[in-house]
Image (cartoon, rainbow, N blue to C red):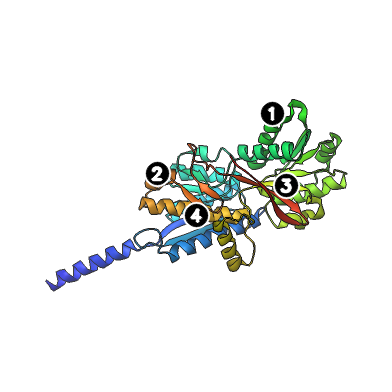
Amino acid sequence: MKKLATVIVLILVGISLAGAQDIKIGGIGPVTGEAATFGISTKNGMLMAVEEWNAKGGLFNDRKIKLIFEDDKGDPAEGATVYTKLIQQDGVAAIIGTVMSKVTLAGAPICQANGIPMITPTSTNEKVTLVGDYIYRACFIDPFQGTVGATFAYKDLKAKKAAAIFDIGNDYTKGLAENFKATFEKLAGKASIVAYEGHPSGATDFKAQLTKVIAAKPDVLYIPDYYNDVGLIAKQARELGYKGPMVGGDGWDSPELVKIGGSAVENGFFTNHYSPADSRPIVQDFVKKYKAKYNAEPDALAALAYDAAYIMFDAIKRAKSTKGADIRAALAKTSIDVVSGKITFDANRNPIKSAVIIAIKDGKQAYKTTVNP
C-alpha cells in the first residue's frame, strides 16, 4: 500500500509539474543587418509583454511564457531557417514575428504548413496573411498605408503632381509605392504621377533616379523605403535642388533617420501605427514603462511587437490550449484594446485600426493627425 501511495503521489506531482511547464513562444526580428534598430525595438517590446504576462501568472494553469527569440538578419533565407528551427527543434506553440515583409513571406508558409499560429507585428505587405489561415498581423496593410499617404499628400499638402522612388527588390516598398500611385492618380488624375523610379536593393547612389524625378517638377516626393535609404535619398534630393515635402511609410520610424538624413528630412511626413504623444492612458502607461525599462522612447516597432505579443497571449489564454488550431480559432475572435488601438480582425486576418501621420520637425518626430479606416 505504501508503494502504491508513493506511486500515486509521484504521478500527481508529475502531473502538477507538467501542468506548470513553460509555454514556448517564438520571437523573430532583425537585430542585426539592414534594419537592426527595427529588430531591437521589436525584441524589447516582446520582452516587456512577456514579463508583464508572467508577472500576472502566465497564460493558463499557472504556465508561464518562455520566449525564444531568433535574429533573422533581415534576410529571407535566414528567416526561413529560424522559423524552421523554432518549430521543429524548439517546439514553440506560436510565433510572433517577423518585421520585414520579405522575410515574413519566407516564414509564413512554414508556419502554415506546420499548423503553427503566427502574428507579425509590422509586415504590411497584403500578401502576408493571404498565405493561410494561421497567419495574422498587428499592423495595417500596404494598400491602407499607401492610400493614407496619397490622401494626405493630395488633401493636406495640396499636391497636384507626385513622384515616387522606391526599392524594386523589396515587397514592402513596392507595395507602398504601387498603392500610393493608384490612389494619387484617382485623386489628382492619371497624369499626376510625373515620375516613378525604382532603385536596386543595397544602392547608396540615387542621383540617376533623382535627376529624372526632380526634372519632372513634382509637388511631393513619395519615398516608401526604410530609414537608412530614406536618409540618403533625402540628402541627395536636396543636393540636387528638390525643396518640396517628402512622404513615406512606417519604415521611416527610426532615430537613425535624422542621424543619416539630418536637415534633409525636415518637411518630411510618414504614415505610422501609433504616436507616443497619443493621450490615451494605455499609450501613456506603455511609454512610461518602456522608458523606465530601456531608457528610450518607444517607436512604433516596439509598440506593435508589444501589441502582437498581447494579442497572441490573449488568444492562448482564451483558448486554454497550446494546439495550433485552438489558438487560431481564438485569434479569429480577438477583440482587445492595445497600444495601437482597438483590435479586431477582418476575413483576411488583418486588423481594423487607425493610422497616424508623423512629421519630422526640428530633428524630431511630431504628431500631425490621425486617419481612421
Q: Amino acid at mark 2?
A: Ala
Q: Which residue carries the number 3 mark?
A: 269
Toward the bottom, the furthest residue is 2
Task: Name the mark nearer the viewer: 1 or 4.
Answer: 1
Q: Residue at x 72, y 50 (%)?
A: 359
Q: Is residue 176 visible?
A: yes
Q: Is residue 298 left or right of residue 181?
A: left
Q: Amino acid at mark 3?
A: Phe
Q: Which residue carries the number 4 mark?
A: 309
Label pair 4/3, CB-CB below 8 angstroms: no
Q: Is residue 96 left or right of residue 31?
A: left
Label pair 1/4, CB-CB below 8 angstroms: no
Task: Name the mark nearer the viewer: 1 or 2.
Answer: 1
Q: Which residue carries the number 1 mark?
A: 186
Q: Quadrant of the N terminus?
A: bottom left
Q: Amino acid at mark 1?
A: Lys
Count the labels in the image: 4
Secondary element at tag 3: strand
Q: Nearer the viewer, residue 67 or 314?
A: 314
Mark sitting earlier along the chain (2/3): 3
Task: Name the mark nearer the viewer: 2 or 3.
Answer: 3
Question: Residue 329 — which label?
Answer: 2
**Distance Cα–Cα, label 2 vs label 3:** 38 Å
Q: Quadrant of the C terminus?
A: top right
Q: Nearer the viewer, residue 317 or 276?
A: 276
